[in-house]
Every structure is written in C-alpha cells, then in structure tokens.
Amino acid sequence: MSQVSVLFVCLGNICRSPTAHGVFMHQVAKAGLGDLVTIDSAGTSDWHIGKSPDHRTTACALNRGYDLSILSARQVIPADFKRFDYILAMDNENLAHLQRMRPNTYAGTLGLFLDFAEDSDYREVPDPYYGGAQGFELVLDLIESAGQGLLQRIQAQLL
C-alpha cells in the first residue's frame, strides 16, 4: 500500500481548515488508516501563523469529540505542492489563490473540499468567524460529510 497526503486550506487557518484537519484525522484513524494518510492544514494568509485554532472552533469541535488543541496555524508554501496529493480549499477565493500558486508540475488533486460531500446544497464551507455558534456547527456538519466522501475516495485508492 502507498501513502496519501491531504492539505486543507482556508484563509487564516484558525477556523475551517483546522476543523477539517481534526475531523479528518479522527475519521482516518477510525478507519484504521492513520499510518497511511498524512494530514495537515494551512491558510493562504499569514495573519495567524503559530496561533491555535479559534476558541469557538475548538469548543465546537470538542463538543463532537474532536481535539484541535495540537494544531497551530501556518501559511501555505510552494513546497506544499510537492508534499500533498490532495490540496483542498474551503472556498473559491482560497482555491483561486492556490491555483495561482500551483506549479505546472503539480499532478495531485487541487479543488474544493465540499466536492467530496454527497447531497450537499453547499459548494463552499462558509467562514464562521464573524457569526454565531450555529455557523461553527454548520461548518462541522459540512466537514464531517465531505470527510466521509474523501475517505471513501482514499480507501478506494489505497486498498
């Protein structure tokens, strides 16, 4: 079996992408694939480098059993296109930023994370930063769904 690497990307790497990182780590471990799948998250901006996920993100995730306390924000770098098989943006704005960074030699999957969600009315994971608790709950719902779809794709690839 080979290895697969996944990078989740949002703007600041303190809300959506660390949530995806933590949820997908949990889903991958539960599937028994923790040794075969490398997971990370990053932001397209440098605003929060080194900071922990937003306290509302952390609390909401913890209520569902996801521990994000080990994560800290970092910025996407060109070398990520050499390291990751899947680079998945939370929204079109960040996807456009990644597409501008993408080297011609990148052969992996660059796209929207919610493309892996079944039966979703959303194409983008909305940014909950300026909203209330319900926004963070919606983000978790969308990410759990897309994570299952991505996990199925990776399982088919690995097994």
Image (spheres, rainbow, N blue to C red):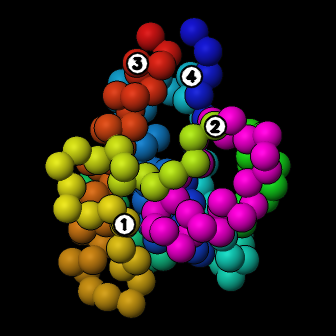
Q: Name the residue under label 1.
A: 125
Q: Do the residues labelled 2 and 3 touch (CB within 8 Å)?
A: no
Please state which of the two labelled residues, at mark 2 or mark 3, is closer to the viewer. Answer: 2
Q: What is the crowding at mark 4: few (fewer than 14 residues within 10 Å), some, or many (at least 20)?
A: some
**Residue beneath the point at 33% across and 62% down:** 123
Q: Mark 3 points at which residue?
A: 156
Q: In this view, does 30 lie above or below 145?
A: above
Q: What is the crowding at mark 2: few (fewer than 14 residues within 10 Å), some, or many (at least 20)?
A: some
Q: Is residue 59 above or below residue 114?
A: below
Question: The C terminus appears in which quarter of the rendering?
Answer: top left
Q: Name the residue under label 4.
A: 36
Q: Position of residue 128 (x, y in %)?
A: 36, 79
Q: What is the crowding at mark 1: few (fewer than 14 residues within 10 Å), some, or many (at least 20)?
A: many
For the residue marked with disc 3, what is the amino acid? Ala
Residue 36 inside the magenta-drawn segment: no
**Region of the chain picked out in magenta, as a range:** 84-107
Q: Do the residues labelled 4 and 1 touch (CB within 8 Å)?
A: no
Q: Is residue 57 visible?
A: yes
Q: Specify the quadrant of the image occupied by residue 19.
A: bottom left
Q: Mark 2 points at which residue?
A: 108
For the residue marked with disc 1, what is the amino acid? Val
Q: Where is residue 22 in the image (x, y as percent from the top left)?
A: 45, 51
**Residue beneath the point at 43% across and 52% down:** 113
For this view, does 141 lie left or right of residue 1? Answer: left
